[in-house]
Image (cartoon, rainbow, N blue to C red):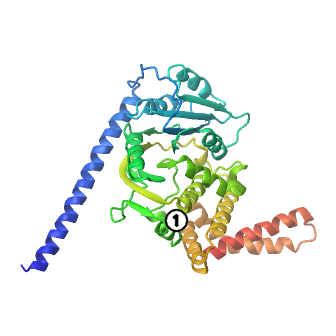
Amino acid sequence: MNHIEEIKCFSIFLIFFSSLLSISRFKFEILELKNYYQICKDGILTNKKHFGKCESPKISIIVPVYNREKYLLRFLRSIQNQNFSDIEIILVDDFSEDNSTAIIGDLKNEDERIILLKNKKNKGTLISRNIAGLKAKGEFLIFPDPDDIMSPTVLEKCYHFAKKFNCELIRFHMYSDKYYIFSLIPEVLPGIVYQPNLRTHLIYGLGYDNITDGILNNKFVTRLLFIKCLNSINKYYLNQKMIYFEDGLINFSFYLNAKSLHLFRTIGYYYFLNTDSISQVMKINSYFECFFLFLKYVFENTKNTLIERNMTLYLLQNYIKRNEVLYKVTHYCKIYMKVINQISKSDFISPFFQTKLEELKVIISNLKILLE
């Protein structure tokens, strides 16, 4: 075996060995998180320590809540038992109809770090999150859902890394109760991605498979970046009740505006798929309304050059093809268009419905263009 072959064999061994280490690490983290979840589920996890109010929290935990009485105790125990305690927990009750507010009120008595805000009407996740984010005092923000749990070490790890390397945005792995890791960060990617490479990856269609994703629960961001992104999306989303694509929108804004992204290869979050979640119930009108607002933001904020605009179109084409609902609908675009054209020619159509038909034609045309 010559010298070059020895180097090749050694390189293959290193890759294989590093893969084994990654698999072993994931198995350990999954076991840790599953055991932690089991404790929560059995009701053994308790919190007998009284936490006083944190006047200058380092991390603000932002949590919109709507009818989550079944999961709130489990979720809040996973927050209270974090290794990192210098936090504030801002829960926004979005006009719940169950006992969510009462449960939060009881827990506030033992943990003064909990702050409860109440919406006077149901405003949706996006607005509720923005309300809390604007009131947050922490240098960093994180956005868990109230029916999931967090790894007991994730806040500590993210905070110390962000401070050490001056990171504005951190993304970590998630684990699902369907027994798989998702939002998985490929090993071939670097640990930290800086601008303009971050923007390039996002726009050139590499994003949703590799660096970027449309999930907010696994992001740890500076409050300054969050406020900057709110200003960026203000005219698109801030004053509207959005059910779909709100996480995709804020994530896209994060990646466009962050100076750097750290890809943290640790499992920090246990995600539970709940069929009663509002995002799991398809409301087709709202779905498309939200999707086209998302498209509007993407196109208007990635048009520095012709190449950038063309590659943004490519990204969106691939995004639609991976989205089951949108992809199925596009198969019927031609049929819909023919029907609409025939109806539009009818004498009995009122001006109001004629306008609505024209709006529908524009939507279908946009979908067709994206898939051409």
Instruction: Name above or below for residue 138 compared with residue 181.
Output: above
Q: Check the picture and name the quadrant holding the C terminus.
A: bottom right
Residue at 7 percent across and 80 percent down: it is: 2
Instruction: Name above or below for residue 350 compared with residue 27.
Output: below
Looking at the image, which residue sits at the far left?
A: 1
Front residue of this view, candidates 90 and 72: 90
Residue at 71 percent across and 73 percent down: it is: 365
Q: Is residue 287 visible?
A: no
SS category of the residue bearing label 1: loop
Density class for disc 1 (Cα within 10 Å; few <14, some 14-19, many ≥20) is few
Q: Which residue is mark 1?
A: 322
**Where does residue 199 sit, x and y in percent of width and height?**
51, 67
Whether residue 160 sits left or right of residue 365 in the image: it is left
Residue at 47 percent across and 23 percent down: it is: 51
Q: For residue 85, which quarter of the picture?
A: top left
Q: Is residue 355 visible?
A: yes
Front residue of this view, candidates 154 and 286: 154
Front residue of this view, candidates 161 and 344: 161
**Where does residue 246 sit, x and y in percent of width and height?**
61, 53
How many tags in the picture? 1
**Where does residue 347 sit, x and y in percent of width and height?**
93, 71
Whether residue 110 sits left or right of residue 301 in the image: it is left
Residue at 59 percent across and 54 percent down: it is: 250
**Where does residue 371 sit, x and y in percent of width and height?**
60, 75
Q: Check the picture and name the quadrant holding the N terminus.
A: bottom left
The amino acid at mark 1 is Arg
